[in-house]
Image (cartoon, rainbow, N blue to C red):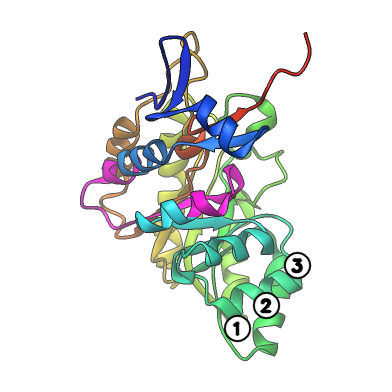
Amino acid sequence: MRHFDFRDGEMFAEDVSLREIANTVGTPCYVYSTATFERHFKVFSESFGSAKTLVAYSVKANSNIAVLATLAKLGAGADVVSGGELARALVAGIPARKIVFSGVGKTETEMRAALSAGIRIFNVESLPELYLLNSVALDMDTIAPIAFRVNPDVTAGGHEKISTGKKENKFGIAWSKAESAYAEAAKLPAIKIVGVDVHIGSQIDKLEPFERAIKKVGSLIERLRQSGHTIQSFDIGGGLGIPYGNNTKAPPLPTEYGALVTKLTRHMDVELIFEPGRMISGNAGILLSKVLYI
């Protein structure tokens, strides 16, 4: 559904004239459609039926605090990758218990801020990060809940530069080392293993890569449980693509994605965590400007 359209040659955002906005606040400015954010979030979050889920909006997609506050009112969580994004999510009213901290470059200061806030989970990307997080949590006399981001060696993404799940990509624990990483985490006194995380890319326009990744990680979850680890959550990441213009390939609908995910995970007994970004905000705003010279 389009919430930006032309009426008699004049563009509107929902029922408000862009000319009126420009005259009121000046240009350039960003104009966002609340109706678009609400619709996209609801369509995505309702695609998983009765499955236990957390939809943690990827703040990197659009970190405007008004946008985050709109999503917070709908029950959204947040996927953050920096202390700044964490602060924005909290100010916008997203509860810390719904915040997932991802990213390859977490600093000690950011870890302390996240632990102080009481976030839901850290998606740990490497053993050095794990050791630092354990040290920080020990110093703060607290426990850090973690999932490892594992790299399933699955090719996905609309372009090779936004594919993040292949073995040569810098993201996550190598597939061959995933189980040993969990064994190492289990030894650390300030670390609590609670889940597994995967994110294979962005602007994915077919379901097959998701299917392969979910099946691979599902088998890993079984082996981890057999080794004595408690796995409560499965973070499937984001990456579902959106159409860019009328002539681009239409990606799968959220309902199709949801049907696939629920079919593949219903036997796993896990909470499902998702990190949609582009799919929620990709066509929810415009940059409004004024022509100065011709």
Magenta segment: does it hold 59? yes
In the image, is residue 248 above or below residue 224? Answer: above
Q: Secondary structure at mark 2?
A: helix
Give the class, few, some or many, for how many residues have Cα within 10 Å of label 3's Cα (few <14, many ≥20). Answer: some
Residue 262 shown left or right of residue 84 in the figure: left
The image quadrant that residue 225 belongs to is bottom left
User: Which amino acid is tagged 2?
Assistant: Arg
Residue 219 visible in rendering: no
Of the 4 image quadrants, the one containing the N terminus is: top left
Residue flagged by tag 1: what amino acid is it? Ala
Left or right of 164 on screen, residue 89: left
Q: Which residue is mark 2?
A: 112
Mark 1, secondary structure of its residue: loop
Judged left or right of residue 284, residue 170 is right
- Residue that carries the numbered disc 1 in the rendered image: 190
Q: Write the residue at 61% across / 47% down.
A: 60
Comparing 47 with 69, the one in front is 69
Q: Position of residue 33 (x, y in %)?
A: 44, 36
**Which callout, 2 or 3, points at the residue further toward the start of the chain?**
3
Label 2 crowding class (10 Å Cα cut-off): few <14, some 14-19, many 20+? some
Question: Label 3, label 1: how many angstroms apart (C-alpha)?
Answer: 17 Å
Residue range highlighted in magenta: 44-68
Query: On residue 107, which mark appears?
Result: 3
